[in-house]
Image (cartoon, rainbow, N blue to C red):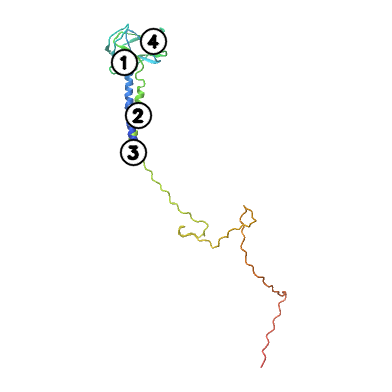
Amino acid sequence: MSVSAAAVRRLLGIALLVVGIVAGIAMWLGASRRYDDAIASLAPAPIGCNTTLVFDKTGTYTFFVETKGRIGPIDGDCASDARSYEVDGVPRVTLALVDDDGDNVDLERTSGPTYDRDGKRGTGVRSVDIDRTGTYVLTATAEDTEAVIRVGRDPSSGVAALRAGAIVALIVGVVGGVLLLVIRPRRRPVRTAPAIQPPWPTGLPTRPPLGPPSANPPVPPPYAPRPPSVRPPAQPAGQPPWYQPPQQPSRPPRASVTEPPSSAWPPPPSPPPADPPER
């Protein structure tokens, strides 16, 4: 069973529309989930304590001062129970990072990035480039110890690209699907082949014909056809055909009449006729 071109275009338009919408929504939700997971993966470091951090990947990391959120129970030298906190404004903190060799690592001041999502709010105050994985010790001090230091990568990294891709996929799917469903291609007119007329004969008298060739059949030539060629027995092959005209019947010889030799003088006049005899 054959399917028409219009039905195929309709199916392609519906499929493109559905795929564009689904892909756009999925990419947008994926970007939001990526942002939430990045915030949840930030490592906590209470103020007034020495916190051991393990960096398993190199790269740039940011130190956030989280002024609103919740922290679970902490064991070790700075043990504390789980608690929620909210601080007005960003307190001024002092941070010191030491690697496993006991050397201080330079921290750069920064003013961002920030996050505020799912009851958590933080502001970036320092950043560091970790070029060697391993164990580091962070010491944080401040006058207000209610806030918590969070360490990790920028939560918004890669989120903008995913959201831009979601918008592009949605636009392409919707616009392309609607165009396939609405616009119909123009049908090209079918060109018929021109009628082939019989060629005009050549080699006929120069008088113009009175009608098409079908109305003026060719006139046979007024001469007899050429007799077939006859090749003499002794003529070798490959030579042009040899033609021998028909023999004319022989006539009997005519008797010759001897005439007197011509003279330069005119002949003498003939005598007058004689008078008839009297009776």
Q: Height in image: 202 above or below 107?
A: below
Mark 2 and mark 4 in contact (Cβ < 8 Å)? no
**Badge 4 is on which residue?**
135
- Determine which residue is flagged by label 2: 169
> x, y (%) of residue 246?
61, 63
Q: Return the residue nearer the eye: 271 or 144.
A: 271
Residue 155 location, quadrant: top left
Counting from the top left corner in percent of width and height, residue 122 is at 31, 15
Residue 106 sits above or below residue 200 on the image: above
Q: Please indicate, yes or no, whether residue 96 appears anywhere in the rendered image.
A: no
Which numbered disc, 1 or 2, marks the residue that appears first in the sequence? 1
Label 3 environment density (alpha carbons within 10 Å; few <14, some 14–19, many ≥20)? few
Name the residue beneath numbered marker 1: 122
Q: Secondary structure at mark 1?
A: strand
Q: Residue at x 35, y 24 (%)?
A: 162
In the picture, the disc for residue 7 is 3
Total labels drawn: 4
**Label annotation for residue 76:** none
Q: Earlier in the sequence, mark 2 or mark 3?
A: 3
Dot 2 lies on which element?
A: helix
